[in-house]
Image: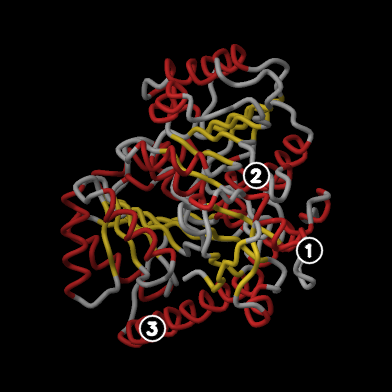
Amino acid sequence: MKSFNNFNLDTEILKSLDILDYKIPSQVQSRVIPVLLDKKDILVKSKTGTGKSAAFAIPICNKIKKLENKLKVLVIVPTRELALQVKEEIEKIGRLKMIKCSVILGKEPLKNQILELKQGTNVIVATPGRMIDHLSRGSVDLDDLDYFIIDEVDKMFTKGFETDINTIMKNIPNTSCKAFFSATVDDDLKEICNGYMRDYEYIEVDEEEILKNQIEEKYIKVEKQKLKYDALKNVLYKFKPETTIIFTNTKKQAEVLYENMKSEGFLVEQIHGDISQERRFYIIDSFKKHEFNILISSDIISRGIHIDDVSLVINYDIPSDSEIYVHRIGRTGRAGKHGKAISLVSNNECRDFENIEVYTKNKIEPIGIEYCEKDKIEYQKTIKELLNKYALVENQEQDEFKGEVVKIHISIGKKKKIRIGDIVGALSNIDSLENSDLGVIKIYDNYSTVDILNQKGKKFLNDYKEIIVKNKKAKIREEK
């Protein structure tokens, strides 16, 4: 069985993976990481939930040199939600190597984005339209680009982004490695990719094997739709899942279910198309932090949203599109972990469910569940204990990273004609610091910030209250 040590990765990357509890590479990671480390073009067919984002985040972070201030990677994605998810994955993996990642999205001030890009960044994650805006303004320089990645490339071309992708591709250097990822690949998509890449390697992850090995699928036969709510509670009380996502076919059903569960004291939230994007981000982030344990959703998060450690997916309604079913249950059993998916099937949904079994080539086992009052009490007690436990674990994980990196505020900046090299020079004169201890450096008008690595930041702050930068005294403190 492979481990991440087999890929000859940098020490900082391996340490980040260990802190994040990434132990064994998933199937897609095992196949993609060595190819991208060799900078070979690839087209990858892999469903969400297989560790796909880490499959490209790990090698690109490994290739970027510490303190490098050049743009080396461009990742194009179809949606804002996915852009933020990818940025989060890259920053987690590249944190100890101080990888700088910028998200470039529409409906946000161009001025702020241009200012951030002027500071220097290693990775840009962008939606197509806003990336073209920056290319036309000359605010992005792709000359040193090592990797060009498109995630969910199938959605790019079904949602009308082909012209935008063509425009971006004209600016990509021929020497850049190109990697396209997709949940579905047909002959048309392969033909399109032939126009963008030469001699690329096609990698197809065995999705049926993933579903079979990682996700335990069951269903409960329910005579009528109105009886599903009791069946849902039976499932929760009997299995006592730590975290659950419940999928409905409509916004209205999501709202009704949310109100019913909330009134009975369940720790539940809902997201669907009528909820603002900002609110959706907040709810998903809270769910990841285990601030509540049940998320009700329409199919808005069935694809492209990365939420680790979802114990159970419940299909409250059966989708008529079998592919949507696959994307839904892909929210559990992620990155090599075991998950459970239970579908509540009414008489009117039997045909759709049979089609799902044909599509997935999997005969799903029926189950019957009844619970007693003791199950309900134990479930409520278990969830309370788990939420307390996760709050503690998250704090410990943050402390582990914080112990490695301390951000320092230096009271001098651009107005005094300070550049990154001046900060490096000043800190290199400190006996207790070496160049390898310096992380991301940013210069602002009146101050600068620098990340001190390797658990040396606290000692540096204890020993010094000011430093000399370009023959000028500058006060230092921890950046809040």
The image shows residue 455, relative to residue 446, as above or below, that is below
- Mark 2 neighbour density, 10 Å: few (under 14) some (14–19) many (20 or more): many
First in sequence, mark 1 or 2: give its number.
Answer: 2
Q: Is residue 23 left or right of residue 334?
A: right
Q: Is residue 251 left or right of residue 213?
A: left
Where does label 1 land, which residue?
434
Give the residue displayed 54% in from the left and 55% down from the top.
215
First in sequence, mark 2 or 3: give its number.
Answer: 2
* Structural distance between the alpha carbons of marks 1 and 2: 31 Å
Which amino acid, mark 3? Lys
User: 460 or 261: which is nearer to us?
Assistant: 460
The image shows residue 116, relative to residue 405, as above or below, that is above
* Structural distance between the alpha carbons of marks 2 and 3: 34 Å
Helix, strand or loop at label 1? It is loop
Helix, strand or loop at label 2? It is helix
Q: Based on the displayed image, in which of its 4 quarters is residue 350 positioned?
A: top left
CB within 8 Å, label 1 to label 2: no
Where does label 2 land, which residue?
55
Where does label 3 land, which residue?
384
Which amino acid, mark 2? Ala
- Residue 278 is marked as none
- Mark 1 neighbour density, 10 Å: few (under 14) some (14–19) many (20 or more): some
Give the residue displayed 60% in from the left and 21% down from the top.
172
CB within 8 Å, label 2 to label 3: no
